[in-house]
Image (cartoon, grey):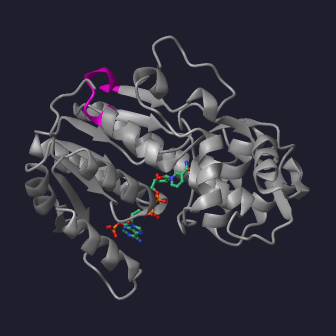
Amino acid sequence: MGSIEQKSRILVFGGTGYIGNFIVKACVAAGHPTYVYVRPMKPDHNPSKLDVLNEYKSLGVTIFEGELDEHEKLVDVLRQVDIVIVTLAIPQCHEQHKIIEAMKEAGNIKRFIPSEFGNDVDRISPLPPFQEGVCKIKKGVRRAAEKSGIPYTFVSSNSCGAYFVNFLLRPSDEKLRKVTVYGTGEAKFPLNYEKDIAEYTLRLATDPRAANSLVFYRPPKNIVSQLDLISSWEKKTGRTLEKTYVSEEEIIKLSQTASTVQDAVGTSILHSIFVKGEQMNFELKEDELEVSKLYPDYKYTSVDELLDIFLVDPPKPASAAFG
Ligand SMILES: NC(=O)c1ccc[n+]([C@@H]2O[C@H](COP(=O)([O-])OP(=O)(O)OC[C@H]3O[C@@H](n4cnc5c(N)ncnc54)[C@H](OP(=O)(O)O)[C@@H]3O)[C@@H](O)[C@H]2O)c1
């Protein structure tokens, strides 16, 4: 692979989370000195975070404990690394402005990959909860990164494979005979296994071709619709699944009447991906990068292979929010 250097020191913020875990493991597997900046454990934190941190220690990951508003500490930590990848949760994405300010002061960061891992937030026009929440914040971080002078890569990795297979097909429930279909079920979207998202992201982080670019993850074998996915799963399991369709009108209503912001955003994300098809309803421009074309040597997991993994050893559902 093209690289700034093979053994760049990589710091991950949000490394104990769902996407972060895949990224940290990919960094370690590729032999990069790997660092995570984590909030100190508090009584309200999920106890499994401690297991994750112990696993990281055993893998040789260096752990820095701190809050994101400890500016001097952040600058000091940043001066010890080359590349920053952020996988903070949606409600914390605005905190990335603090990381950008600290990176500007540190002055040594060769690449910054902010917490995106979803739709191209500059292109889509989703329902208000998604537009005003996640999109607005992630766009603000893009603009700040562009102004910062720090080389950046924005990743539009589209739909997380294991995450959405768990969400749409509930594969761990062997008695399941019913599935929910959002809209007509025909809109296409790229469904990428998280291990590949992490591997591609890591390659981009050290690739000069991806500096100051937006990169789309659209591997050709992974472009599916909900109906394609259900039909493939029926063939693999020998089960027939009864489909309950949720109409666009119902989804819009749900996003307007949701009792929590998280539910409202979640519903409007479903609308964007599955009803409007906003991950695939545009052609890439000539100068826009697509990750499987950048790395034709990398054998990504096709959706068909991902479903086979679910038949044998199902990846656990995440408690994370999508987007
Ligand atoms: N396209 C998709 O299908 C999809 C699916 C999932 C996620 N995503 C995207 O991926 C990115 C990461 O999401 P995720 O689901 O992986 O995140 P997550 O697991 O919910 O959390 C990631 C990290 O954020 C930090 N965090 C969580 N709650 C916090 C709080 N209250 N205060 C401060 N920090 C907190 C934690 O880090 P520490 O405790 O270690 O500090 C945590 O490990 C987001 O941009 C999200 O939109 C996309």
Q: Is residue 272 left or right of residue 3?
A: right
- State yes or no: residue 48 in magenta: no
Residue 88 place in picture, x, y as percent = 39, 58
Q: Nearer the viewer, residue 59 or 210?
A: 59
Residue 96 place in picture, x, y as percent = 33, 52
Image-quadrant location for residue 67:
bottom left
Q: Is residue 183 above or below residue 279?
A: below
The magenta region covers: 204-212
Q: Is residue 124 above or below residue 89?
A: above
What residue is drawn where x is 16% and y is 58%?
A: 74
Q: Is residue 253 left or right of residue 91?
A: right
What residue is drawn where x is 78% and y is 56%?
A: 237
Residue 60 place in picture, x, y as percent = 16, 62
What residue is drawn where x is 45% and y is 28%?
A: 291
Quadrant in which the N terminus is drawn: top left
Image-quadrant location for residue 265:
bottom right
Residue 16 place in picture, x, y as percent = 35, 65
Asked if residue 278 can be seen in this view, the reply is no
